Image (cartoon, rainbow, N blue to C red):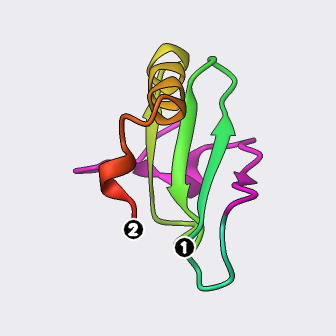
């Protein structure tokens, strides 16, 4: 399978079998992030407004570090 590469990820539609889950905190104004567990154990992240656009793919350890950092407030300076 050929996966079209972008500078910032892979084409989300090329991730066969990905089942995307939208954040329960996504709002109605279109600010939505979706994630999908991939068959190799990695995790893809995409903007739900562009479902065929780029997706960033991270290892499970990278996603865990990000989520734990978010829980700890490491990224609070990026919000409102």
Q: Look at the image and tell me whether residue 5 can be seen.
A: no
Magenta highlight range: 1-25
> Residue 34 is drawn in which quadrant?
bottom right
Q: Please tell me whether the stretch drawn in magenta is mainly helix, strand or loop.
A: loop
Q: Nearer the viewer, residue 70 or 35?
A: 70
Tell me the element at label 2: loop
Q: Position of residue 6 (x, y in %)?
A: 29, 52
Instruction: Assign the N terminus to one quadrant of the image.
Output: top right
Kindly identify which residue carries mark 1: 31
Q: Position of residue 30 (x, y in %)?
A: 59, 80
Residue 40 appears left or right of 77 = right
Q: Nearer the viewer, residue 46 or 14?
A: 46
C-alpha separation, residue under disc 1 versus residue under disc 2: 14 Å
> Which residue is located at x 53 percent, y 46 percent?
45
Q: Is residue 53 above or below residue 3?
A: below
Quick one: label 1 or label 2, which is nearer the N terminus? 1
Q: Is residue 56 above or below residue 30?
A: above
Residue 22 is marked as: none
Q: Is residue 76 above or below residue 51?
A: above
> Which residue occupies the extreme top position in the image?
61
Q: Position of residue 61 (x, y in %)?
A: 49, 14
Kindly identify which residue carries mark 2: 80
């Amino acid at each position: 399978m050929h996966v079209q590469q972008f500078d910032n990820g892979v084409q989300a539609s090329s991730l066969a079998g990905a089942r995307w889950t939208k954040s329960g905190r996504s709002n109605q104004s279109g600010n939505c992030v979706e994630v999908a567990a991939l068959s190799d154990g990695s995790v893809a992240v995409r903007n739900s407004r562009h479902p065929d656009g780029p997706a960033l793919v991270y290892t499970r350890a990278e996603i865990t570090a990000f989520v734990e950092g978010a829980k700890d407030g490491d990224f609070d300076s990026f919000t409102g």
